[in-house]
Amino acid sequence: MSYDVMQKALAKVNVNIPASDDKIVIDENANLNFIAWGDPQISSISPLRSSHFKSACLDVANAEGKFDLITMLGDITEYGRECEFQFTAALLDTCKGKFDNLICVSGNHDVRLRNHKKQIEKFNAFLKSVKGGIAGPDDRYWFATTIKGYKFIMLGTDAATFEGSYLSTAQLKWLDKELAKSKDDKAVFVLNHQTLKNTNGLPYTWLGKGKWRGSVGWQSDKLADVFSKYNNVIYITGHLHFGTNWYNFEDCGGFKSLCVPTVGVNNHGTPDNDGQGYVISVYDDKIVMRARIFAEGKWFPKDHPGAYIEVNI
């Protein structure tokens, strides 16, 4: 299916216009404000996902102020097709001017069953096509960047896996060195598609299947070992498609793990509203994570599980 066909398919479905009476007001007193979205999973055969994502983008377009960054936690596309990446870029154009930077990590749907090198090229071409998009090297998904003094580390599979993420020894050693460069009194955000084994409600949040399924996979313990050396890591992931609940955030001691709901493909669990995600504000002494139903233009009530998370730095 082509880009044009995807556009015509979207025109035939209802795109919800988010409410405007509970719009996002960006806190200018924060050092950094960014959005965390999981799994747009834009599909060349499912226009409903595009409609959810477009609604979320319309909500951002209606925000008061400007975000420093939008992050997307993998599964940008369903099949890793060029037209799907192009259509995602076009949908993001809905909220152009409301964010300065865009960083994304690859998900299993972006890479599986395809040539690994060619998918990296498609992924980077997509990021370069969006104003403010930050692409990594030509030969791998993992790299680091700094935004307003805060380090963001992007991880990504080193092989075209089907569900998990193969993190090579070289990538894990590089991650360890990058984290070692950072001061313990300043948060470092590590982004990846899959969460760690036995965290964020696994295996229950992956329909209770398997000891490692839904997680990074065979390198999960090795990744956790790297994180355990440091006290300032905020690990942000997607993949589980689980709606905002007490499972989203887990304090793992030295590091914290946030697994965000999906913004495009359907969420399961309760609540299962479409177009969920987080607005994250970083201050000198704390990080505030607020869950929002972007596609509807409203915040979750503060007392809803997982809706308001505060992490002291």
Image (tube, grey):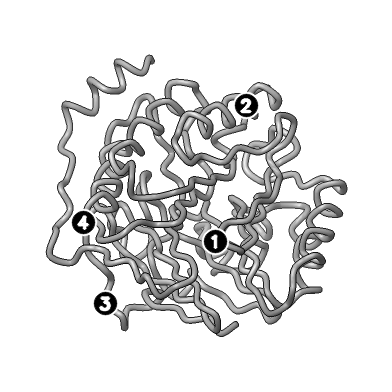
Residue ID at (82%, 45%): 168
Q: Is residue 181 above or below residue 155?
A: below
Which numbered disc flags the more N-terminal residue, 1 or 2?
2
Residue ID at (47%, 29%): 129
Give the amino acid type for the residue marked by disc 4 in the picture. Glu
Which numbered disc flags the more N-terminal residue, 1 or 3?
1
The disc label shown at residue 208, or none: 1
Residue ID at (67%, 70%): 233
Give the amino acid type for the residue marked by disc 3 in the picture. Pro
Circle 4 is placed at which residue position? Answer: 296
Cα distance between the residues tagged 1 and 3: 28 Å
Circle 2 is placed at which residue position? Answer: 119
Q: Nearer the viewer, residue 289 or 149?
A: 149
Q: Is residue 80 above or below residue 270?
A: above
Cα distance between the residues tagged 3 and 2: 40 Å
Tell me if mark 1 has few (under 14), some (14-19) or many (20+) residues whose alpha carbon lies within 10 angstroms of its own: few
